[in-house]
Amino acid sequence: MKQPNWKPLLFTCTMAAIGLQAQAQQELKPELQQAILKTRQGSIVELPDFLTEKIQNIGYQKVVLPGPQHVISDDPEYIRVPEAIALQEPVQPGAVRLYVYNVNGVKEPAKIDRRITAVIKNNGTADMHIRMLKYSSQKPSTNYYQVGKQGLADYFASSPQNTIRTVKPGQVIAIDEKLEKYITKYDELVHGFYEFTIDQPGEISILQTDLNTSGPKALSRIKTIVPPNGHNAGRGVFGVSNYRIITDSVYDTKEGVKEIIVADGDNDPWVSGKEKNTPGVATLAGNYGVMYYIEMKWKSTDGKGLALVTWNSRSGNNQWCGGMANTMVVSDGKFKEGIIQLPSDRLVTKQAPEAILIQVFKPAANGEEQTIRLTYSPPGASCLPTPLIFIPVDLK
């Protein structure tokens, strides 16, 4: 999970909201509007001389929603020693969201195959019952973009499982049996994204071991907890797992092109938490695993529709920003409501003039107010932020 480039935006949501920045409207040429309307959902459309970081922002309020304990393992991202614990955190009874993002980084004295797995120990005095609510498990791969994009798609598409597993006091079990079976070669990423409930206090460990040892057995002998290196997104238990984004006002298509920016570390700061093995406050740079439920009120007093696109806005600012791949859930429009991979017609989008069409929203016949709903989570392996650009388009 590459640490995001959070260079401050020239025009922030806050500034736009209170009118401290004046800016000319960004306009889209008629031929580019037609190109958008001919593009399939999720596909790339080229918009020369249009994409810029200077598009006017739509102000919003950010509400913290009740949600699960958010545990993430991504520091260090690369586990360089043959056998070690990459994360070990206590969790309390209730819901837990766990994001595993670790790589077999063993190359000394040789590159060797490893097992990277997630386990949970029942630290309570009674039986623990664990039930999976959301499940996404990817086969280890060096194609980090695909793993991150497909991982989000599988997470969004998953539903609660009926199976309830029982864990005796003091017992350790694998959280994901698939991870127990995978062989992780050098430089391959293990990506697991889960949400589950427990009814006893527990302890989650992410560990790397040999192929002949199960995760629960390895935990009983591993004493080494690798320290964080501070160069990746972060690790620990974080205090925010869900945000609701509510725009400050009703957007009218006559206002021209505007955008919403989240997960940039500036207008939308990184969430804080605690990593038990290091002092002070932990920071989750990128807000990976956090769910954003975005609601935007809009209307069309000029009869125009509204196209929603995104692009890799930081491609020139950071060596890790050469590609962007994402998955979102988008409300109904020209295309049906549902999960869409971005892009859907290739692995990544690289840089301007490439944009990805997310949806085209139709105006109400009588100009009444409508609500656009999006579910977004910062994509692993991709640079941030993910600009959400709203472009008025003539659908006639």
Image (cartoon, rainbow, N blue to C red):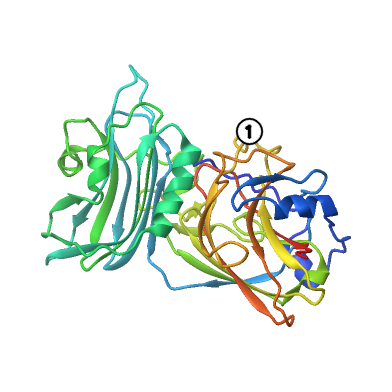
Residue type (three-letter) at the residue carrying disc 1: Gln
Q: Which residue is at a point 22% across and 46% down the rendered structure image?
A: 177
Q: Disc 1 marks which residue? A: 319
Q: Is residue 255 left or right of residue 250?
A: right
Q: Is residue 287 left or right of residue 20?
A: left
Does 213 appear above or below 191? above
Determine which quarter of the picture holds residue 219: top left
Is residue 250 visible from the viewing direction of this image?
A: yes
Q: Which residue is at a point 48% across and 66% down the rendered structure image?
A: 242
Determine which quarter of the picture holds residue 133: bottom left
Looking at this view, name the residue that lies furthest to the front.
Answer: 396
Determine which quarter of the picture holds residue 220: top left
The C terminus appears in which quarter of the rendering?
Answer: bottom right
Percent coordinates x, y for residue 213 in the rendering: 17, 34
Q: Which residue is at a point 11% across and 60% down the rendered structure image?
A: 169
Q: Which residue is at a point 65% across and 53% down the rendered structure image?
A: 357
Give the structural element (helix, strand or loop) at label 1. loop
Give the camera-side residue of 347 and 168. Answer: 347
Give the camera-side residue of 203 and 68. Answer: 68
Percent coordinates x, y for residue 168 in the rendering: 10, 59
Q: Is residue 61 left or right of residue 110?
A: right
Number of callouts: 1
Give the camera-side residue of 320 and 51. Answer: 51
